Image: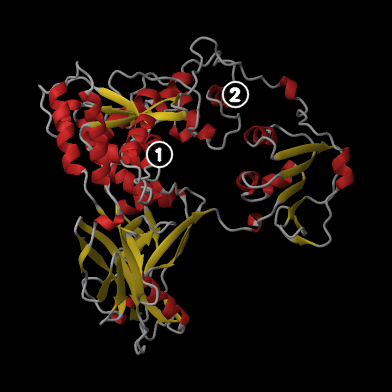
Amino acid sequence: MDGLLTREIEVIFLERLARDPGASAWDSVQLTEVDVLGALRRRTPHLHVGVEELLAAARVSPALSCRAAAPAVVDGQLSRHTLHCHPRRLPGATPTSGQADFARLAREFNAAARQPVAGLSRAELHLRGGEGTLTVHNRGYGTDDDLQVIGVDGPVWLMAAVDGRRVELRANPTHNGCYRGPVTVRTSAGVATCVVASHQWRCPPLTTDPVGWRALVTRHAHLDEEASAQVVEEALTAAGYRALAGGFFALHSHGRDAGTGSAPPPTCTWQITAEHLREVRLPAEGHAPLVRLYGPGGSDRYDVPFDGAALHGEVLEELFQMWDVRAGRELRLRPYRGHYQFEVHRPGTWLNVAAVEYGVVGTLHALHRTPHFWDQLEEWLGEAPVRVLLHGAEPGLFGEMQKRFPGRLTLRLTDQPPGADRLYFTLAAGQLEARGLPDGQLLRGGVWPEALWKAATPRVRSMPGAAARPASPAPATSGATAPYAIWTGAVGHPLQVRPDRVLHSVKEILGVEGPMVGHHLYARYGAALGAPAGRAALTPLALRRALNPILYRATQGGELLAEDEFGCGGQIGLVYRLPGQTVRARLKGDRGLDRIPRSELRAVVGRLPDRGGMPEAEQVAWVLEQFGFGRFLVGGPEQIRPLLRELDRPAVVPSQRRRAR
């Protein structure tokens, strides 16, 4: 199907060239996707091709490329893409081809390609009750009646019967386990393939403890190990076993007994600290020498070494980077397909109660004494409205939150003591739950102070003496921070197109947004890639593995420049730019502070006005405001202060350009 569609698009461009007396193999020809879709529907009305399928098929051809274009209306339809054709790369064309040659090639291709193409009703079939049906369709020219089924080839555990264009499949297992294998249907118009899966597993009598899941299935060429591991885990869990590392299971009574030499239970929970991240080690016990960890979605896989005392190694460091594991977060493992699946989240506390509305009554002192309150407040504001009744003055912390979450946070100040400091959770069932601050003890009969709320002032008051505090200087007019331009467009799938086309897309992104931190560049490429038709979206880890060698070769060859401005090592943490591209101080756009190059921060720090009369805290706030951040950005002072202090040193050694590894 994809080959037919690619050939059809090439023929459309050939016919376009055949109508041009001045056509040359060296003159690029372009058409909008609307024009190409219209021509396809006239040539093959039964294909029902969409824009994504069209672009994917065009990228397969060495003569075609796709680019995002400014939205325009073509024949009453909105066009967002342009297809470019390089005639000399078309099949059969030469550097000297002209109009007559293109007309001849179009006639030859039309004569050769107008034939049926076999296709199946499904690309993957799961047999229900051991049985299933496939239907053969014509994906090319003509009708379904123009092709006939000749035979079916499949694995030995599958039986097939042909009834016209229908293929009846029935599993005939000889071993215990889940099966997965290819089926090829031979027709008069070629072959069509399908992957067939069947679960044929029954739990045998269990006589050992512990037991490995591989001992309960029979190894063979078409064993689906992941599916087998999952059904075995479900059966053993129901039988009273618990999952260990490495695909082993033990009865609940099989515990840690020094007298019997039993292994300790594996460590599955860590409270991440800065030391864990710095040393890339997670102290643990009870694991196998190699621990397989799956990401939250079950797709990304990490094989982490265990040395008897801790999980460690480069793969663990990659996990930390790809999943943004930070100090203070909690990393948990749970059994998954005979191994583990990890989860990263904030520590579970009473503040994590899910509610449809949150209420805060008290003083800033009580809120500061409540562990994780400010982090949790951001989590609440991302999901539900929050009302805050504050006793006393407010220094601007909530004001910054109001800017970041407009319409979600309502703040009122009161001079009347509201009583005990407390939080209110309005649950989904309409119930109101109250907890005291800072320890979270459950309060009985808690009622929201509605009368006090109505009488309170619905605005942020200044702190006493705030007028004496130096005000933040206004943004500089000379060398002001420029807006951040976000690149939009389409990119080639790095597993489907040539590396030079991937690098071309990377250069287009950098041309608009460079210099860029690697994390941000990879994320922008992945967002533009999306999920291609007929296959799952590329995971962050898979995208990184595909782009890393391409960017490495580009930096080695001088097509890109990469600098380790953060001093953290690792290819994804480099700052990439095009040759000749200078530092540009810009607003934050969709970047976090850690995604802004250090050179860009230094450029803004270097134009601070009146440093001598400005406290360091005000200097930090001024720099953050130049980028569009709030004065009290979490983590802001820790990143800005070292750059401020660099100005007081006699000389600052610039970051050395390094090769991506």
Q: Quadrant of residue 435?
A: bottom right
Q: What label does residue 523 carry, if any?
A: 1
Which one is earlier in the sequence, the residue at label 1 or at label 2?
1
- Residue that appears at 10% across and 21% down: 96
Give the farthest residue toward the top: 478
| Residue 486 located left or right of residue 120 | right
Observer-nearest of 392 and 104 = 104
**Res 578 visible:** yes
Residue that appears at 16% across and 27% down: 102
- Between 98 and 371, the residue placed more toward the observer is 98
Identity, as a three-letter code, of the amino acid under mark 1: Ala
Amino acid found under the numbered disc labelled 2: Glu
SS at circle 2: helix
Please state the horizontal and vertical placement of residue 174, each as a whole percent of the image. Answer: 25, 82
Label 1 element class: helix
Q: Which residue lies under the disc numbered 2?
A: 618
- Image quadrant occupied by the C terminus: top left
Work out whether 580 lies above or below 228: above
Q: Position of residue 289 (x, y in %)?
A: 29, 66
- Answer above or below: position of 261 versus 620: below
Displayed quadrant of residue 548: top left
